[in-house]
Every structure is written in C-alpha cells, then in structure tokens.
Image (cartoon, helix red, strand yellow):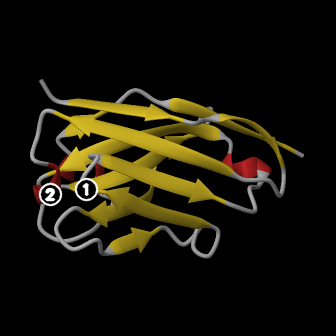
Amino acid sequence: EVQLQASGGGLVQAGGSLRLSCAASGFTFDDYVIGWFRQAPGKEREGVSCISGIDGSTYYADSVKGRFTISSDNAKNMVYLQMNSLKPEDTAVYYCAAGLKNGLGLVEYEYDYWGQGTQVTVSS
C-alpha cells in the first residue's frame, strides 16, 4: 500500500522557520519525483517544490525560491522541506505527493499518490 505521511506543520511567526517531513512507503522511492504542494483557504492548490528520487535535482516555485529548500534521504524514503523566512502568505495546508514522471515539475495531474496535509500557519 502506497503511503505518504506529511508532518512538521505548526504555528510560527513571520520570519521564522519550519521543517516539513514526508515519509513515503509502498513504492520504489528512487523512481519517483516527490513534490510539495500547498493550498491556502479559498485558493487553488499550488506547487511549491519537488525533488527527483533518481538524481536529487530540485525545482522551486518562484514564490519560495531562496527561502525554501527541499531535500531527501533515499535510504529512509524521506523528503524534507526546510522553510525559512516564512511569510503570512505561506499559510496553507501543505501536501506531499509522488509522481512516476519524467523530469521535474509541479503539475498536479502528473503526481500519482498524495498524502494528507499538514497545516502551516504564519502569523504577522
């Protein structure tokens, strides 16, 4: 059974940091791209960042470049999202997802498996 478990959300003040974790199981981690997406209240879900299980290459949405860092530990089937310099507009439910796809990107339909979300709230 494929499972993706996101954790690490919480309440933080603007300018603070959080580290999200995504634990993956039930599929060959190295073959997949793992992505982070987020959905703010009243808004559509948007892609944040992704990482290739094959070569560790990464991709970031413009809104988080320079502030967020994605990384993975293939031995543990874990992906992390280090979020620094958080802003109130980063408030959202964050989801991790896995896609058996060629190349990086944050197109939702290219991701096959989704985990439950973890809430990130950034206060001003």
Q: Position of residue 25 (x, y in %)?
A: 20, 34
Answer yes or no: is residue 45 visible.
Answer: no
The residue under label 1 is which amino acid type?
Answer: Asn
Of the numbered discs 2 and 1, the one sitting upstream in the chain is 2
The reply to whether dot 2 and dot 1 touch (C-beta < 8 Å) is yes
Circle 1 residues within 10 Å: few <14, some 14–19, many ≥20:
some
Residue at 37% from the left image edge and 30% from the top image edge: 5
Q: Is residue 100 left or right of residue 6?
A: left
Q: Position of residue 69 (x, y in %)?
A: 53, 66
Tell me the SS state at disc 2. helix
Q: Position of residue 111 (x, y in %)?
A: 22, 47
Q: Is residue 23 left or right of residue 63?
A: left
Instruction: Give the residue furthest to the right.
Output: 124
Answer yes or no: is residue 1 visible.
Answer: yes
Tell me the SS state at disc 1. loop
Provide the residue designation for mark 2.
Answer: 30
Q: Closest to the observer: 99 or 30?
A: 30
* Residue 3 against residue 36 in the figure, above or below: above
Circle 2 residues within 10 Å: few <14, some 14–19, many ≥20:
some
Q: Is residue 20 left or right of residue 57?
A: right
Q: Quadrant of the N terminus?
A: top left
Instruction: Give the residue furthest to the front.
Output: 75
Residue at 11% from the left image edge and 53% from the top image edge: 100
Inter-mark Cα distance, 2 to 1:
7 Å
Which label belongs to residue 96?
none
Q: Position of residue 89 (x, y in %)?
A: 72, 50
Provide the residue designation for mark 1.
Answer: 74
Residue at 16% from the left image edge and 68% from the top image edge: 54
